[in-house]
Image (cartoon, rainbow, N blue to C red):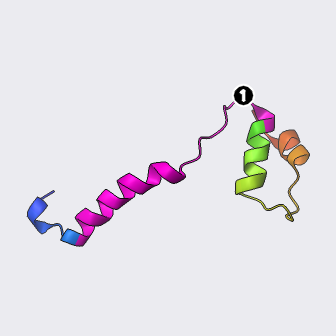
């Protein structure tokens, strides 16, 4: 990567991402904590009004 070919906007954007991303990052539950994984799935990949149910996730989980 040639630093002289990178625009100032790209450098600033990268710096801002590195500063802001940790503020909004949510840790994933442990892989062996099935109820926590199901709750995470419901909160982040489904909605409160969605058809997906935590119990169904736990039954279908292959782990």
Closer to the camera in the image, 37 or 19: 19
Closer to the camera in the image, 51 or 21: 21
What residue do we see at 26% from left, 65% from top?
A: 12
Query: Quarter of the image holding residue 47?
Result: bottom right
Q: Is residue 45 left or right of residue 59?
A: left
What residue do we see at 78% from left, 45% from top?
A: 39
Total label count?
1
Spot occupied by residue 63 in the image (x, y as percentages of width and height): 75, 32
Q: Is residue 63 left or right of residue 7?
A: right
Name the residue that disc number 1 marks: 32
Tell me: residue 61, above or below residue 4.
above
Residue 13 highlighted magenta (yes or no): yes
Residue at the top extreme of this rendering: 32
Query: Quarter of the image holding residue 36?
Result: top right
If the image is split into quadrants, where does the N terminus sit? bottom left
Spot occupied by residue 28 in the image (x, y as percentages of width and height): 62, 40
Q: Is residue 4 left or right of residue 47?
A: left
Spot occupied by residue 20 in the image (x, y as percentages of width and height): 43, 56
Please identify the dominant SS of the magenta region: helix
Mark 1: few/some/many CA within 10 Å (<14, 14-19, 20+): few
Tell me: residue 5, above or below residue 37.
below
Q: Secondary structure at mark 1?
A: loop
What residue do we see at 74% from left, 40% from top?
A: 37
What residue do we see at 53% from left, 53% from top?
A: 24
Residue numbers of the magenta segment: 9-35
């Amino acid at each position: 990567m040639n630093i002289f070919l990178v625009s100032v906007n790209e450098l600033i954007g990268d710096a801002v991402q590195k500063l802001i991303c940790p503020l909004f990052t949510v840790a994933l539950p442990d892989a062996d904590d099935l109820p926590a994984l199901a709750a995470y799935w419901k909160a982040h990949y489904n909605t409160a009004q969605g058809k997906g149910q935590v119990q169904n996730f736990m039954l279908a989980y292959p782990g």
